[in-house]
Image: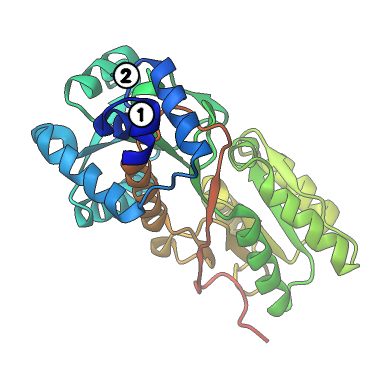
Amino acid sequence: MEDVARTAGVHQTTVSRALRNDRRLPESTRLRIKTIAEEMGYRPNPLLSALGANLRQRRTGEFSATLAYIVRADSADDRRREHLAGASGAAAAQGYRLEEFVVGSAGVSADRLNDILLARNVQGLLIGPFPEPRGTLELRWDEFCAVAIELTLAEPPFDRVVHDNYSGMRTVLRECRARGCSRPGVVLTEAAHSRTDGLNLGALFVDQHGDGAAPVAPLLLSDWSGEAFAAWFAQHRPDAIITSNALTAPIQEWCASAGLVIGRDLGLANINAMPEQSITGVQQAWDAIGAIAVQLVIDKINRNDRGVPAMQRTILTPGSWFEGTTLPARR
């Protein structure tokens, strides 16, 4: 760093600030010093960079070690609790505190939130999943290090941590066949399909293409319709239903009214299994997703990597198999 400072004709502190993209320096100065450093083959020591970031945080005041978890007022409570639990534990282990901020009809506006975060020197943001697919949020992103959770934030395209929906569906399909269910059918809401970028049906297509058996066409519903489900069921005669949380209850009610015993006459699997429901399937690791997102945010803070990344990264987090009571025993 001394060599870069000597070549650039500036103080070593100026080089340090330029390489950290400190906006107190003019952009032309930052670019000139970065170019010189790159030409000289400068590489930072990651351990010293992390130590320097920690020392700078301690000097900036009480709230500099706070991370924000931003969530919409109408987001699902169960997912929010799990994300917060995992993220809070991971933040505390790194000396940070996580605070929840609610935006939307029952919370603050985006403009007001922006002012609050800047006033309190909150540098790292976790953007929780939105209730609808392809959501957007407007803040002064150049001021923050941000990571999104799940796939629902379309703009800006931040780095994100998501459940591996494709792998989860492939696991459920394999388990169904291992238990003698050779004709599993997938039933999802259109919202659930969109929230996962269609990855669940992509996994279904690959599975059916390699299986060789006559495929059961998936059923997508804008909302639950017993008539539409009954017509689909009569046409395809699946021996197991694969679905998600929004449709597990109405499907169970329909089966009961049709005299079908789930687990014996018809299998039922959930791609987002909740242990309290006893429905067999893949349990998504929401707490781990929150913890990994925190680590990404802290890494960005240590590098002063603010704003929208030039290339979006997605980290896939696997779920775990939950052995409920709604599929036959493995053969």
Looking at the image, the residue that sits furthest to the top is: 111
For label 2, count other residues whose C-alpha is less than 10 Å away and answer few (under 14), some (14-19) or many (20+): few
Image coordinates for residue 104, horizontal then vertical, percent: 35, 20
| Residue corresponding to mark 2 | 25
Which residue is painted at 56% across and 51% down in the image? 244
Other residues around mark 1 within 10 Å, as few (<14) / some (14–19) / many (≥20): many
**Viewer-proximal residue among 321 and 235:** 321
If the image is split into quadrants, where does the N terminus sit? Answer: top left
Label 1 secondary element? helix
User: Marks 1 and 2: in contact by CB < 8 Å?
Assistant: yes
The colour scheme of the drawn protein is rainbow
Residue at image coords 65%, 33%? 222
Which one is earlier in the sequence, the residue at label 2 or at label 1?
Answer: 1
Q: Is residue 173 above or below residue 49?
A: below
| Amino acid type of the residue tagged 1 in the rendering | Ala
Q: Residue at x 29, y 18 (%)?
A: 114
Q: Secondary structure at mark 2?
A: loop
From the viewer's side, name the closer residue of 82 and 122: 122
Rendered view: 312 above or below 265 = above
Where is mark 1, residue-wise?
Answer: 18
Q: Quadrant of residue 177?
A: bottom right
Q: Is residue 111 left or right of residue 218?
A: left
- Name the quadrant of the C terminus: bottom right
Q: Nearer the viewer, residue 199 or 5?
A: 5
Q: Horizontal and vertical percent for residue 4? A: 38, 36
Give the alpha-carbon distance from disc 2 to disc 1, as whole Å.
7 Å
- Picture coordinates of residue 43, whole percent (x, y): 43, 47
Give, as a three-letter code, the residue at label 2: Leu
Q: Is residue 170 visible?
A: yes
Position of 23 relative to 300 (above/below)? above
